[in-house]
């Protein structure tokens, strides 16, 4: 009910969207189905029994959801949503079965909201620059937190944020609660489709164009400081930020290298206008980290 109160339900109902929902036997299966049915959608539910018997690995990434693409086309769905097991992350596939990228979920929500409402936007420092550019376009404040839902929420509260989230498909709407919520994402994306009359693929085309690459490199905890210092010296033309690991920003790309809290590895995220440039940046960082003995 809290989610339904946020949106124009009548507009969505009038469209009678056919929606494929892959709940993967997770906790959001029943709530997701009920939300979509309340919005007048024809629901094709995959993994609808919330028993934890996953049909595929739980992360809603492109590789893992590749098997979902043929289903989307086969059933003639207008859109497909894929939740993670605890329903706080949401991935989207368009009507052709094309995976839109986990970063796109939050960007679609922010773009839709900022067309009619104004207020600060908060993401973590590992989230696509799409969000920052949307905030700039609509002239609203933008803030970055360290990685992790509690950090995002703390900053949202401090800045009285309109909306926030993490780029791995986790939108946070304070009107519902200060937690990542896939149901919020589904409702806002469907409302954007209904109000514009556009398919989700066309909505995604309206977003700033970036490609993001994520990888990791083995690195002992005792070598982290030396490694980050080395990277900062090498990329001396970038704007450096040590909020969480090391983030390096250029006008057309950025790089984040941050140590894991649970494994002897460093995670690398690179984003640029093209996938080739993002991969090249990630590879440069990887080579520099590997050289740290």
Image: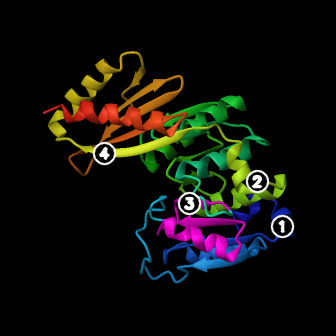
- Image vertical order of residue 51 relative to residue 145, above or below: below
Label whose residue precedes the other's in the sequence (3 or 4) = 3
Task: Identify the residue shown where x is 55% and y is 72%.
Answer: 28
Left or right for 263, reference 251? left
Q: Quadrant of the N terminus?
A: bottom right
Say if mark 2 contacts mark 3, CB within 8 Å: no
Secondary structure of the residue carrying numbered label 4: strand
What's the distance in space between the residues labelled 1 and 3, CA to CA?
22 Å
Q: Which residue is mark 4?
A: 216
Front-most of residues 132 and 67: 67
Q: Callout 3: 10 Å neighbours few (<14), some, many (20+)?
A: many
Magenta highlight range: 65-94
Q: Residues within 10 Å of mark 2 (few under 14, many from 20)?
A: many
Measure the alpha-carbon separation of dots 2 and 4: 35 Å
- Front label number (3 vs 4): 4
- In the rendered view, tell whether residue 21 sits above or below residue 222: below
Q: Residue at x 48, y 62 (%)?
A: 60
The residues bearing labels 3 and 4 have C-alpha atoms spaced at a distance of 23 Å
What residue is shown at x 46% (from left), y 50% (from top)? 149
> Could you say which disc has been placed on residue 90 in the image?
3
Residue 170 belongs to magenta span: no
Q: Residue 126's spot in the image, x, y percent? A: 45, 40
Q: Depth check: 14 or 62 in front?
A: 62
* Residue of label 1: 15
Q: Which residue is mark 2?
A: 192
**Does residue 97 appear in the picture of this structure?**
yes
Give the answer, above or below, for where 145 lies relative to 153. Answer: above
């Amino acid at each position: 009910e809290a989610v339904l109160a946020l949106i124009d339900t009548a507009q969505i109902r009038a469209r009678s969207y056919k929606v494929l929902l892959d709940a993967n036997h997770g906790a959001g299966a029943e709530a997701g189905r009920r939300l979509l049915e309340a919005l007048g959608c024809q629901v094709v539910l995959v993994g609808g029994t919330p028993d934890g018997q996953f049909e595929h690995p739980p992360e809603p990434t492109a590789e893992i959801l590749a098997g979902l693409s043929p289903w989307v086309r086969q059933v003639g769905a207008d859109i497909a949503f894929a939740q993670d097991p605890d329903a706080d992350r949401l991935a989207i596939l368009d009507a052709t079965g094309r995976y839109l990228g986990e970063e796109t979920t939050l960007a679609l929500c922010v773009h839709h909201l900022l067309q009619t409402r104004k207020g600060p936007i908060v993401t973590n420092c590992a989230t696509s620059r799409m969000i920052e550019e949307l905030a700039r376009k609509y002239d609203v404040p933008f803030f970055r937190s360290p990685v992790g839902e509690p950090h995002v929420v703390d900053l949202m509260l401090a800045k009285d944020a309109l909306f926030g989230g993490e780029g791995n498909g986790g939108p946070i709407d304070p009107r519902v609660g200060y937690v990542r919520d896939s149901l919020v994402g589904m409702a806002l994306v469907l409302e954007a489709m209904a109000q514009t009359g556009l398919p989700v693929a066309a909505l995604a085309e309206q977003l700033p164009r970036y490609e993001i690459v994520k990888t990791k490199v083995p690195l002992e905890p005792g070598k982290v400081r030396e490694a980050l210092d080395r990277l900062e010296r090498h990329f001396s033309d970038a704007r450096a930020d040590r909020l969480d690991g090391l983030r390096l920003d250029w006008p057309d790309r950025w790089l984040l290298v941050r140590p894991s809290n649970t494994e002897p590895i460093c995670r690398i995220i690179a984003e640029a206008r093209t996938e080739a440039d993002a991969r090249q940046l990630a590879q440069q960082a990887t080579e520099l980290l590997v050289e740290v003995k």
